[in-house]
Amino acid sequence: MLTLDKFEEASEKVKEVTLETKLVYSDYFSAQTGNKVYLKPENMQFTGAYKVRGAYYKISTLSEDERQRGLITASAGNHAQGVAYAAKCYGLKAVIVMPTTTPLIKVNRTKNYGAEVILYGDVYDEACAYAYELAEKNGYTFIHPFDDTAVATGQGTIAMEIFKELPLVEYILVPIGGGGLATGVATLAKLLNPKIKVIGVEPSGAACMKKSFEEGKVCTLSSANTIADGTAVKTPGEKIFPYIKENLDEILTVEDDELVVAFLDMVENHKMIVENSGLLTVAALKQLKVTGKRVVSILSGGNMDVITMSSVVQQGLIFRDRIFTVSVLLPDKPGELGKVANTIAEQQGNVIKLEHNQFVSTNRNVAVELRITLECFGSDHKKEIIRALEKNGYKPKLVLVSL
């Protein structure tokens, strides 16, 4: 059972390995939503995510025999690092099975904590099945990333910290993958204040808990396709599902495109790197149908590789109309390119790339194509640039951005 005594015990225990992640008030998201929005930045933990809480507390509850047999788990990355780091603190052997699609930064950091890493399967569920096989074969003690009440108790210590810092919190938004974090946070939150609203958030492409929540039983998705790799789970936890049904008020879903924009918002307004799974609660803020409430968004992690980060930033700029590409036709004669460049410069547009295609027409004197990729301040500025080009006799056409 998840009891208040166990949560209090876990809260004291995890202090041995966690950093203090004080709430950050967000002027930006508060203004956007009409609520008083606070961020719980678990992306600032030593391992880059909240997962060390559940792993460390779970190991503390094991017998000496269970510990000495060695630990094994499966994870898309953050639980892997949590178990690896916790095992290192206890001086124990740890084997981690990770999907082959896991970002390199998470694989390397897990290895750096001294764990043996095995890459297997395309998604978490396949990696987990293989980890169970290895546990059976080698006698390892399995540490489940979410379907374990001790692990969920450790994760729920986040709620204890939120209440101590913001006793009058009214809404808590929590990311959901398999459901361990949501179980711990929702259960403790309801124990401390039965009137509080706890809302889970999942990626639309891997909404296994929402489907299970609606049908009243654990359901398995046919696929889990999302850029939020830390929450790409096809089947939620069986043991923890009753706690979810009892204590979670609602589950919202978020599209991948919304996560891209949320990443840009977080970087520009809070100077924080938060991975896609950790941004679920931020992207869902606009779905809340309330105003004037004290809302806490849990940022579950910040382990994002640089290549993914650069791609997300680029896509975010495109979605926000900060980068766009136009195609214009002009005669192939000296000075025409300069006229277009001057028109853009007068509107304070910044040219990123030019592509000059002389073979768009058999008669080059009539027209050649110029594709211009521009940086601007947003949708209104983009429209001003296009109007200026039209005013000067060009017929700009928006085309797919290619950087």
Image: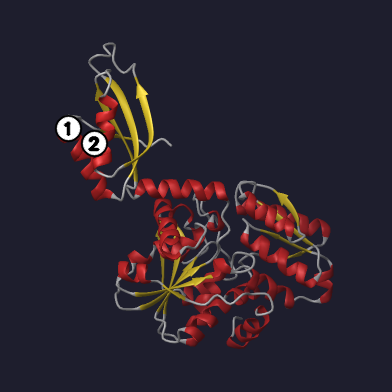
In terms of secondary structure, where does tag 2 sit? helix
Q: Amino acid at mark 2?
A: Thr
Disc 1 secondary structure class: loop
User: In this view of the protein, which residue sits in the foreground, 106 or 22?
Assistant: 22
Residue 59 visible in the shown view: yes
Question: Relative to residue 22, is residue 371 depicted above or below?
Answer: above
Q: Label 1, on which residue?
A: 392
Residue at x-position 33% and y-position 30%: 371
Outermost top residue = 362
Q: Percent position (x, y) of residue 373?
A: 35, 36
What's under tag 1, amino acid-wise?
A: Asn
Given residues 196 and 348, the one toward you in this image is 348
Quarter of the rendering occupied by the C terminus: top left
- Drawn side of residue 232 relative to residue 116, left or right: left
Callout 1 touching callout 2 (CB < 8 Å): yes
Residue depicted at 45% across the width and 59% down the height: 267
Residue at mark 2? 343
The residue sitting at 76% across, 68% down in the picture is 87
